[in-house]
Image: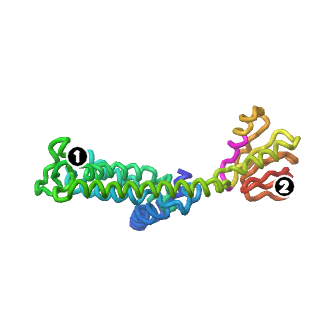
Amino acid sequence: MKRFIETSYLRTTIPLGDNLNRFIDRFLEDQSLIGLLLTGDLHSRHHLQGSGGAFFYSIFAIVVIGFVIVVARRRNDPWWRFVLYGLAAAIVPGAITTWPTHALRLLAWPVFLLLLAVPGLEWFLARKPNLLASSSAEPAKTDEDRRSTAESFVPRPVLLSLLAILLGFCAVETYWFQTVYRREGPKREGEFDVDYKKAYDAAVSQSSRPIYLEDGRWGPGYIHALWYATLEKRPTSEFTYLPSGSKAPSGAVVISTSDVCEGCETITRAYVYHVYRAP
């Protein structure tokens, strides 16, 4: 609940109508095609800016075709009704929090989008005249009918040519993402706690033991010290975790993720990590 309160705008002290209006705004914001196809999550830990959106344009075009087919021809099928429900419900975890287009909270959304690409691919690959142009509201009767979803007036060579173009563009999008990711991705050292090793090395080079691990504004960094100690076969007993509100003994070495330290003797700073000797 503490984490929910930190990340969400929903409050029992706010009128229900205000909560609902904010939810609708956030819901619409999180299904924005700008975030999905163009920018992705603006948090650099979750998505590399300049590499494209969270979903490829080429595959999204197939998804749109699949969505139209499901709504027009397969809405009576319980499975596809579930997929449409899941598509909408997958946005809710992101919509109840303040950060727009949060990739981790919207993690299920691309899964349902990919499911909707299946009828789109069937439409492109169909060999027979389909039932999409039929006036009947009944769902397809057989598996073969389900696969035959291309309209009879669209020649199959045309469909295959369009699909080849989309898949070719998908390859271009993949190449672009990989190029940007491999060039710029490793530069996000701070986002992935790379600098903790510098703080850790500075702390263990001191003779004082145990080394105290203090968590502050920048999160629970203590686990990194235990991880590196394990890798180096160093006894984890050399480290002591400081509970919230506790202070290390005077003269003790501390690795901290806190911004504030009055009267401390700084040993080194590495990104958000502060190694100091307690006052």
Contact? badges 2 and 1 (CB < 8 Å): no
Residue 248: x and y in percent read 80, 46
Colouring style? rainbow
User: Disc number at residue 266?
Assistant: 2
User: Which tag is nearer the camera, tag 2 or tag 1?
Assistant: 1
Amino acid type shown at disc 1: Arg
Q: Measured along the vertical axis of the image, is residue 72 above or below residue 247?
A: below
| Residue 66 relative to residue 269: left or right | left
Q: Quadrant of residue 230?
A: top right
10 Å crowding of disc 2: few (<14), some (14-19), many (20+): some
Q: Quadrant of residue 188?
A: bottom right
Residue at the (19%, 42%) spot, across then down: 144
Total number of numbered discs in the rendering? 2
Q: Secondary structure at mark 2?
A: strand
Q: Which residues are magenta?
A: 217-225
| Residue 108 relative to residue 231: left or right | left
Which is nearer the N-term, disc 2 or disc 1? 1
What residue did someone put label 1 on?
147
Residue at the (53%, 53%) spot, across then down: 178
Residue 124: x and y in percent read 27, 53
From the viewer's side, name the closer residue of 228 and 173. Answer: 173
Amino acid type shown at disc 2: Thr
Residue at the (11%, 57%) spot, across then down: 135
From the viewer's side, name the closer residue of 134 and 109. Answer: 134
Residue 211: x and y in percent read 80, 42
| Residue 45 relative to residue 27: left or right | right
Residue at the (82%, 59%) spot, across then down: 262
From the viewer's side, name the closer residue of 45 and 69. Answer: 69
Q: Secondary structure at mark 1?
A: helix
